[in-house]
Image (cartoon, helix red, strand yellow):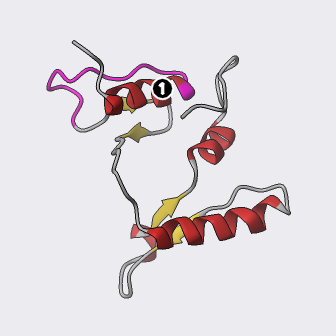
Amino acid sequence: MSDKAWKACERRMARDVGVDRIPVTGERHGADFTDAIAAYQLKVRRMLPSWLWHWLGGIQATAATQGKSGILVLKTPGQKDTDALVILSWKDWTALHGVPAGKADDRD
C-alpha cells in the first residue's frame, strides 16, 4: 500500500521535532504526533487564504531585519485574547522549538 502524501508529511514533521507519527489506532485523540511541549494535528489543504500568506510574509520580513521570527496573531472582534490563534512558519517553529541534531531544514 502506498503512503498517502498527508501521512508522509505527518511523518516528516514529527521527525523534525524528534518524535514519531502516532499511528491511527483509536488512541491518538486527534493528535498526529506529540512532543514534550505540544500535541500536533496536521491538516494538508489545497489552498489557504491568500491574505494569511500576505500578512505572515509581511511580519516575517519585518522580523528578519531584527533577527527574529515573524508571528501572526489572529482573533475576531469580541473574542477573548486568550483564544486568539498564533501562526508562524514551520521553519520558525522548529527554530524556536529546537530541531534534533542532523535534521534538514529544506524539506517540502
Say whether residue 37 is magenta: no
Q: Is residue 88 above or below residue 101?
A: below
Question: Label 1: which residue?
Answer: 12
Main secondary structure found in the magenta portion: loop
Q: Which residue is at a point 67% across and 68% down the rendered structure image?
A: 59
Q: Which residues are magenta?
A: 16-29
Q: Quadrant of residue 47?
A: bottom left
Task: Give the class, few, some or many, for how many residues have Cα within 10 Å of label 1's Cα (few <14, many ≥20).
Answer: some
13 left or right of 98 in image: left
Q: Quadrant of residue 64?
A: bottom right
Quadrant holding the C terminus: top right
Single out the residue that lies furthest toward the top. Answer: 1
Please state the horizontal and vertical placement of residue 16, each as a whole percent of the image: 56, 28
Q: Is residue 99 above or below residue 38?
A: above
Single out the residue that lies furthest toward the bottom. Answer: 77
**Depth check, front residue: 14 or 45:** 45
Q: Which residue is at a point 67% across and 70% down the rendered structure image?
A: 58
Please state the horizontal and vertical placement of residue 29, each as a whole percent of the image: 21, 35
Q: Quadrant of residue 96?
A: top right
Q: Which residue is at a point 66% across and 25% down the rendered structure image?
A: 104
Q: Which residue is at a point 54% across and 22% down the rendered structure image?
A: 18
18 left or right of 42 in image: right
As helix, strand or loop, the secondary structure at mark 1 comes to helix
Please state the horizontal and vertical placement of residue 9, each as a whole percent of the image: 41, 31
Q: Is residue 69 above or below residue 4?
A: below
> What's the amino acid at mark 1?
Arg
